[in-house]
Image (cartoon, grey):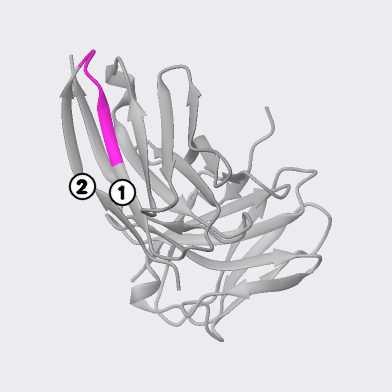
Amino acid sequence: EPEVTQTPSHQVTQMGQEVILRCVPISNHLYFYWYRQILGQKVEFLVSFYNNEISEKSEIFDDQFSVERPDGSNFTLKIRSTKLEDSAMYFCASSFGIEAYFGPGTRLTVT
Amino acid sequence: GENVEQHPSTLSVQEGDSAVIKCTYSDSASNYFPWYKQELGKGPQLIIDIRSNVGEKKDQRIAVTLNKTAKHFSLHITETQPEDSAVYFCAASINTDKLIFGTGTRLQVFP
Protein backbone atom coordinates (compact mmCIF):
# COMPACT_ATOMS: atom_id res chain seq x y z
CA GLU A 1 0.00 0.00 0.00
CA PRO A 2 1.45 3.41 -0.95
CA GLU A 3 2.51 5.59 1.94
CA VAL A 4 4.01 8.98 2.67
CA THR A 5 7.62 8.78 3.76
CA GLN A 6 9.68 11.38 5.62
CA THR A 7 13.37 11.84 6.34
CA PRO A 8 15.06 12.18 8.69
CA SER A 9 13.05 10.64 11.51
CA HIS A 10 14.87 12.81 14.03
CA GLN A 11 16.84 16.02 13.47
CA VAL A 12 18.76 17.84 16.16
CA THR A 13 19.98 21.33 15.35
CA GLN A 14 21.29 24.40 17.07
CA MET A 15 19.28 27.59 17.30
CA GLY A 16 19.84 29.78 14.27
CA GLN A 17 20.73 26.91 11.95
CA GLU A 18 18.83 26.03 8.80
CA VAL A 19 17.06 22.70 8.50
CA ILE A 20 15.40 20.95 5.59
CA LEU A 21 12.79 18.31 6.23
CA ARG A 22 12.04 15.97 3.38
CA CYS A 23 8.93 14.14 2.32
CA VAL A 24 7.99 11.81 -0.48
CA PRO A 25 4.20 12.03 -0.94
CA ILE A 26 2.07 9.27 -2.44
CA SER A 27 2.88 9.28 -6.12
CA ASN A 28 -0.43 10.23 -7.76
CA HIS A 29 -1.46 12.76 -5.15
CA LEU A 30 -1.94 16.39 -6.07
CA TYR A 31 -2.18 18.23 -2.75
CA PHE A 32 0.66 18.42 -0.27
CA TYR A 33 0.71 19.68 3.29
CA TRP A 34 2.94 20.29 6.25
CA TYR A 35 1.59 20.12 9.78
CA ARG A 36 3.37 20.29 13.09
CA GLN A 37 2.65 18.91 16.54
CA ILE A 38 4.29 20.31 19.62
CA LEU A 39 4.74 17.58 22.22
CA GLY A 40 1.44 16.66 23.83
CA GLN A 41 -0.57 19.14 21.78
CA LYS A 42 -2.82 18.97 18.76
CA VAL A 43 -1.74 18.80 15.17
CA GLU A 44 -1.54 22.28 13.58
CA PHE A 45 -1.72 23.20 9.90
CA LEU A 46 1.30 24.99 8.47
CA VAL A 47 0.95 25.14 4.71
CA SER A 48 -0.77 23.57 1.72
CA PHE A 49 0.75 23.25 -1.73
CA TYR A 50 -0.97 22.58 -5.03
CA ASN A 51 0.02 23.01 -8.66
CA ASN A 52 3.54 24.05 -7.68
CA GLU A 53 2.52 26.89 -5.45
CA ILE A 54 1.38 27.58 -1.92
CA SER A 55 -2.41 27.54 -1.76
CA GLU A 56 -2.73 28.49 1.91
CA LYS A 57 -0.51 29.08 4.91
CA SER A 58 -1.13 29.60 8.59
CA GLU A 59 0.14 32.35 10.87
CA ILE A 60 2.84 29.96 12.05
CA PHE A 61 4.28 29.77 8.53
CA ASP A 62 6.23 33.04 8.59
CA ASP A 63 9.15 34.22 6.47
CA GLN A 64 11.47 31.71 8.15
CA PHE A 65 9.58 28.86 6.51
CA SER A 66 9.53 27.83 2.87
CA VAL A 67 8.38 24.83 0.89
CA GLU A 68 9.52 23.42 -2.36
CA ARG A 69 8.75 20.57 -4.69
CA PRO A 70 12.09 20.36 -6.45
CA ASP A 71 11.22 17.37 -8.60
CA GLY A 72 8.29 15.08 -9.28
CA SER A 73 8.60 13.17 -6.03
CA ASN A 74 10.03 15.21 -3.16
CA PHE A 75 8.36 17.88 -1.07
CA THR A 76 10.53 19.82 1.36
CA LEU A 77 10.04 22.18 4.28
CA LYS A 78 12.91 24.55 5.06
CA ILE A 79 13.27 26.52 8.24
CA ARG A 80 15.84 29.22 7.62
CA SER A 81 16.91 30.12 11.14
CA THR A 82 15.53 27.74 13.74
CA LYS A 83 14.23 28.91 17.11
CA LEU A 84 13.74 26.89 20.27
CA GLU A 85 9.98 27.05 19.78
CA ASP A 86 10.32 25.29 16.42
CA SER A 87 10.96 22.06 18.31
CA ALA A 88 8.09 19.77 17.35
CA MET A 89 7.06 16.82 15.23
CA TYR A 90 6.60 17.85 11.62
CA PHE A 91 4.22 15.81 9.52
CA CYS A 92 3.93 15.81 5.77
CA ALA A 93 0.60 14.79 4.28
CA SER A 94 -0.68 14.29 0.78
CA SER A 95 -4.07 13.94 -0.82
CA PHE A 96 -5.62 13.23 -4.17
CA GLY A 97 -8.35 15.66 -3.20
CA ILE A 98 -10.26 14.06 -0.35
CA GLU A 99 -8.58 11.87 2.26
CA ALA A 100 -5.23 13.15 3.53
CA TYR A 101 -2.56 10.61 4.40
CA PHE A 102 0.16 11.48 6.84
CA GLY A 103 3.78 10.45 7.00
CA PRO A 104 5.46 9.16 10.16
CA GLY A 105 6.90 12.58 10.98
CA THR A 106 10.26 14.17 11.67
CA ARG A 107 11.05 15.05 15.24
CA LEU A 108 12.90 18.37 15.20
CA THR A 109 14.81 19.29 18.32
CA VAL A 110 16.32 22.76 18.48
CA THR A 111 18.92 23.27 21.19
CA GLY B 1 -11.58 30.75 11.52
CA GLU B 2 -12.61 27.22 12.32
CA ASN B 3 -12.22 25.93 15.86
CA VAL B 4 -12.68 22.29 16.84
CA GLU B 5 -13.29 21.22 20.42
CA GLN B 6 -12.89 17.59 21.47
CA HIS B 7 -13.97 15.70 24.59
CA PRO B 8 -12.98 13.88 26.66
CA SER B 9 -9.22 14.40 26.78
CA THR B 10 -8.73 10.94 28.27
CA LEU B 11 -10.96 7.89 28.22
CA SER B 12 -10.41 4.55 29.90
CA VAL B 13 -12.61 1.58 29.10
CA GLN B 14 -12.64 -2.12 29.76
CA GLU B 15 -11.98 -4.40 26.81
CA GLY B 16 -15.26 -5.16 25.07
CA ASP B 17 -16.95 -1.94 26.17
CA SER B 18 -17.83 0.90 23.83
CA ALA B 19 -16.02 4.22 23.59
CA VAL B 20 -17.47 7.52 22.39
CA ILE B 21 -15.49 10.64 21.56
CA LYS B 22 -17.26 13.91 20.75
CA CYS B 23 -16.25 16.96 18.77
CA THR B 24 -17.86 20.29 18.01
CA TYR B 25 -16.91 22.71 15.28
CA SER B 26 -17.59 26.39 14.84
CA ASP B 27 -17.63 27.06 11.09
CA SER B 28 -20.91 26.00 9.49
CA ALA B 29 -19.13 25.93 6.12
CA SER B 30 -17.09 22.88 7.21
CA ASN B 31 -18.25 19.86 5.27
CA TYR B 32 -15.63 17.15 5.74
CA PHE B 33 -14.88 15.47 9.08
CA PRO B 34 -12.17 12.82 9.32
CA TRP B 35 -10.98 10.93 12.37
CA TYR B 36 -7.35 10.00 12.90
CA LYS B 37 -5.71 7.49 15.20
CA GLN B 38 -2.19 8.26 16.37
CA GLU B 39 -0.09 5.59 18.00
CA LEU B 40 3.01 6.48 19.98
CA GLY B 41 5.79 7.79 17.76
CA LYS B 42 3.74 7.54 14.56
CA GLY B 43 1.88 9.87 12.28
CA PRO B 44 -1.91 10.26 12.32
CA GLN B 45 -3.68 7.44 10.53
CA LEU B 46 -7.03 8.07 8.87
CA ILE B 47 -9.58 5.62 10.25
CA ILE B 48 -12.92 6.96 9.07
CA ASP B 49 -14.40 10.13 7.66
CA ILE B 50 -17.81 11.62 6.99
CA ARG B 51 -19.07 14.32 4.70
CA SER B 52 -21.83 16.75 5.50
CA ASN B 53 -24.33 15.14 3.17
CA VAL B 54 -24.67 12.07 5.40
CA GLY B 55 -25.55 11.68 9.06
CA GLU B 56 -23.82 8.41 9.87
CA LYS B 57 -21.13 6.13 8.51
CA LYS B 58 -20.00 2.77 9.79
CA ASP B 59 -16.97 0.60 9.16
CA GLN B 60 -16.90 -2.62 11.15
CA ARG B 61 -16.44 -1.65 14.82
CA ILE B 62 -16.17 2.09 14.24
CA ALA B 63 -18.87 4.56 13.33
CA VAL B 64 -19.13 8.29 13.02
CA THR B 65 -22.25 10.41 13.40
CA LEU B 66 -22.73 14.00 12.32
CA ASN B 67 -25.28 16.55 13.48
CA LYS B 68 -24.94 19.55 11.18
CA THR B 69 -27.55 21.60 13.01
CA ALA B 70 -25.75 21.29 16.32
CA LYS B 71 -22.33 21.32 14.65
CA HIS B 72 -21.07 18.25 16.37
CA PHE B 73 -19.82 14.84 15.35
CA SER B 74 -18.85 11.75 17.27
CA LEU B 75 -16.71 8.64 16.95
CA HIS B 76 -18.09 5.40 18.30
CA ILE B 77 -15.91 2.34 18.82
CA THR B 78 -17.70 -0.84 19.83
CA GLU B 79 -16.21 -4.01 21.30
CA THR B 80 -12.99 -2.21 22.14
CA GLN B 81 -9.71 -4.13 22.08
CA PRO B 82 -6.33 -3.30 23.66
CA GLU B 83 -4.97 -2.43 20.22
CA ASP B 84 -7.51 0.39 20.01
CA SER B 85 -5.46 2.19 22.66
CA ALA B 86 -4.09 5.36 21.05
CA VAL B 87 -4.74 9.08 20.75
CA TYR B 88 -7.70 9.90 18.54
CA PHE B 89 -8.07 13.24 16.77
CA CYS B 90 -11.12 14.63 15.07
CA ALA B 91 -10.74 17.24 12.37
CA ALA B 92 -12.86 19.50 10.21
CA SER B 93 -12.28 21.10 6.87
CA ILE B 94 -14.03 22.97 4.10
CA ASN B 95 -14.01 21.12 0.80
CA THR B 96 -11.27 18.75 2.03
CA ASP B 97 -8.75 21.59 2.25
CA LYS B 98 -6.55 22.17 5.33
CA LEU B 99 -7.56 20.15 8.37
CA ILE B 100 -8.31 21.84 11.67
CA PHE B 101 -7.72 19.30 14.40
CA GLY B 102 -9.28 18.83 17.79
CA THR B 103 -7.13 18.55 20.89
CA GLY B 104 -7.11 14.75 20.94
CA THR B 105 -8.46 11.99 23.17
CA ARG B 106 -6.16 9.47 24.77
CA LEU B 107 -8.07 6.17 24.76
CA GLN B 108 -6.85 3.39 27.00
CA VAL B 109 -8.45 -0.04 26.74
CA PHE B 110 -7.76 -2.31 29.70
CA PRO B 111 -7.75 -6.07 29.16
Q: Which residue is mark 2?
A: B9
Q: Earlier in the sequence, mark 2 or mark 1?
A: 2
Q: Secondary structure at mark 2?
A: loop
Picture coordinates of residue B28, whole percent (x, y)? 48, 63
For the record, the magenta segment spans B15-21
Q: Nearer the viewer, residue B26 or A24?
A: B26
What subunit carries mark 2? B
The answer to whether residue B64 is above or below residue B58 is below
Q: Hey, what amino acid is under mark 1? A: Gly
The residue most toward the front is: B69
Residue B24 position (above or below residue B76): below
Q: Amino acid at mark 2?
A: Ser
- The C terminus of chain A: image quadrant: bottom left
Residue B40 placement (x, y as % from top left): 34, 38
Q: Nearer the viewer, residue B71 or A49?
A: B71
User: What residue would you read off at disc 1?
Assistant: B104
**Label 1 SS:** loop
Which class describes the residues within 10 Å of circle 1: few (<14), some (14-19), or many (20+)?
many
Contact (CB < 8 A) between labels 2 and 1? yes
Quarter of the image that includes the N terminus of chain A: top right
Chain of the residue under the numbered disc 1 shown in the image: B
Res B79 visible: yes
Q: How far from the left and from the top, in percent, is residue B80? A: 29, 18
